[in-house]
Image (cartoon, rainbow, N blue to C red):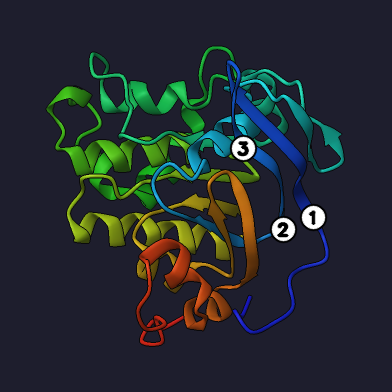
Amino acid sequence: MSRDNARPEKILLKVDDLHVAYGKAEVVHGVSLDVRAGEFVVVLGRNGAGKSTLMHAISGLVPKRGGTVTFEGQDLTHATPRQTVQAGIVQVLEGHRVFHTLTVEDNLLIGTYARTPHGDRSKLDAIYALFPEMAEKRHQMASRLSGGQQQILAVAQGVIGEPRLLILDEPSGGLAPLVVDRILSVASDLCKSGLAILLVEQLVEKALHHAHYAYLMETGRMVTAASSREIAQGDLLHRVFLGGGEPVDQVEVL
C-alpha cells in the first residue's frame, strides 16, 4: 500500500475511549485508535507519554479503567493475554525478552504454544527462511546471543505464532542501527504480505520511513493522527516530541 493512498477500509483493531490507571493514577486518558488490514501504524511520543501502557492494555497485560478494545469485531476489552494471542494479536515486549535458559529453537516453539499446546515444528522452516541468523544458531542457548540477536529472536517468536496483528514495543532499545534497520525492514516486508503492524518507537525518522499511518501521543492523550508523510512534514511532531525545530522533510517515506 502506498503511503499516499487512502487507508484500507477493513479495520482489524479498534480502540475506543480507552482509560488505563495504575492505582489512582490514570496514565492513558480516553485514547482511540485503529489499525487497518495490512497497515503499518506507528505510535510516537516522548518517554512517559503512555505508549507502552497503551500497548499493554491492548494485549491484556494491564486492566482497563474504561473504554473498549475490539479486534475483527470481537470484544477483547476484558480478555486475558492468552485470549488476546488466540484472537490474533501478538506483542513483542520492549527489552528483547526471551527465555535465556532455552535454545533458540525452543524459544521459537514457545511462540506456537497458544495455538498448539505441544508446539508446532512445522512452522520452523518458514521462520528460519525469514530469519536466517536464527537458523544458524538454532541449537544455541538464547543467553549466548547478543542483545541484537535476542531482539531478532523475540520478533521471530512473535511472528511464528502467525498473528494478524504484531505489536512491536520499542524494538530499537539499546541496539545498533543496523539491527534496528533489520528488524524494521522485516516488519515492513511482513506488512506487505498482509500482516498488520503496530509499532511504538523512539527513532522517529526510521519509524516514519516504514509506517503508513502515525499517531502522536502526549501525556496519555492522542493529540493527532495522519499519514506518516503528513506527520513527518508537520510542525506538531516537533513541538510535542522534539521540542521544536524543523520538520523531518528529509525522511524518505516508502
Q: Position of residue 75 (x, y in %)?
A: 84, 31
Mark 2 in CB contact with mark 3 (< 8 angstroms)? no
Q: Given the image, on which type of amino acid does mark 2 rest?
A: Ala
Nearer the observer: mark 1 or 2; the answer is 1
Mark 1 vs mark 3, foreground winner is 3
Label 1 to label 2: alpha-carbon separation: 6 Å
In this rendering, the answer to whether 141 lies above or below 67 is above
Q: In which quarter of the image is residue 18?
A: top right
Residue at 73% x, 21% y: name it. 79
- Say what secondary structure mark 3 lies in: strand
Residue at figure coordinates x 28%, y 49% from the top left = 132
Which badge, 1 or 3, is on the more N-terminal residue? 1
In the figure, 236 relative to 102: above or below?
below
Q: Which mark is residue 28?
A: 3
The dot on residue 37 is 2
Q: Which residue is drawn at 81% across and 43% down?
A: 72
User: In the image, which disc is placed on residue 24?
Assistant: none
Numbered disc 1: secondary structure: strand
Is the residue under label 2 in contact with that under label 1 (CB below 8 Å)? Answer: yes
Q: Which residue is drawn at 77% across and 29% down?
A: 66
Report whether 213 appears left or right of 36. left
Alpha carbon separation for disc pair 1 and 3: 22 Å
Image depth: mark 2 or mark 3 in front: 3
Mark 2 or mark 3, which has the lower sequence index?
Answer: 3
| Residue 202, x across and y down, in percent | 36, 55
Asked if 236 appears above or below 249 in the picture, the reply is above
Query: Where is mark 1, residue-wise?
Result: 11
- Please tell me whether mark 2 sits on a helix, a strand or a loop: loop
Tell me where residue 196 sits by quadrant. bottom right
Locate residue 180, reporting x and y percent.
Answer: 28, 56
